[in-house]
Image (tube, helix red, strand yellow):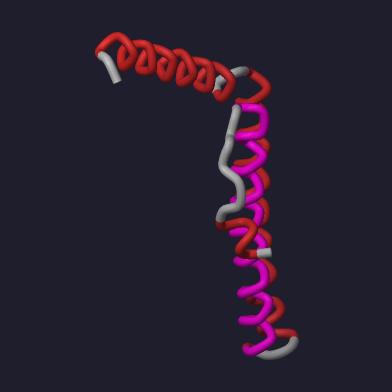
Amino acid sequence: MTKLERSRVKESLLVEDKAVEEVLTSPPMAEYYDLQRRLSLQMAGLTLAITPLVCLTYSVGIGLSYLLGAVTGIVYFRLLAKSIAVVGVGSSRIGGLRHLLV
C-alpha cells in the first residue's frame, strides 16, 4: 500500500469516526441513553427492594434464585441496549456474545 493510499484510508476512517460520533451524541441518542440509564436504575432498585421480601416470604433459596434471575435480566438488558445503540451506525459485526447467550 502506498503512502497516498494509506493517507486516504486514514482520512476515510476519521470521517467515519466523526459521523459515528455525531450520531451517538445527537439529541435522540442522548434521550435514548437517558432512558437506558433510568431503566437500569429502576431494575436495580426493584431487584434490591424485592429480593429481601422474597427471602422473608418464601425462603433464602428462592430469594437467591430470584436474585440470580433478576441480575441475569439486567445483564441481558445491557447487552440488548448496546446492540440497539449501534443499529444504523454501520456495525458490520455479526454474531457476538448476545447470540451466545440466547
**Does 72 lie within the magenta span?**
yes
Question: Residue 20 location in percent, x, y?
Answer: 53, 22
Q: Which residues are magenta?
A: 61-89
- Specify whether residue 44 is in view: no
**Which quadrant of the view contains residue 66?**
bottom right
The residue at the point 70 percent across, 76 percent down is: 53
Depth check: 99 or 50 in front? 99
Q: Main secondary structure of the magenta part?
A: helix
Question: Residue 56 location in percent, x, y?
Answer: 68, 84
**Which quadrant of the view contains residue 44?**
bottom right
- Specify whether residue 20 is in view: yes
User: Which residue ends up furthest to the front in the rendered image?
Assistant: 1
Please say if 62 is above or below 77.
Answer: below
User: Which residue ends up furthest to the right in the rendered image?
Assistant: 57
The residue at the point 66 percent across, 34 percent down is: 87
Depth check: 87 or 82 in front? 87
Please say if 7 is above or below 87.
Answer: above
On the picture, is 34 further left or further right than 13? right
Please say if 9 is above or below 73.
Answer: above
On the picture, is 5 further left or further right than 42? left
Question: Residue 52 location in percent, x, y?
Answer: 64, 76
Please say if 34 is above or below 40.
Answer: above
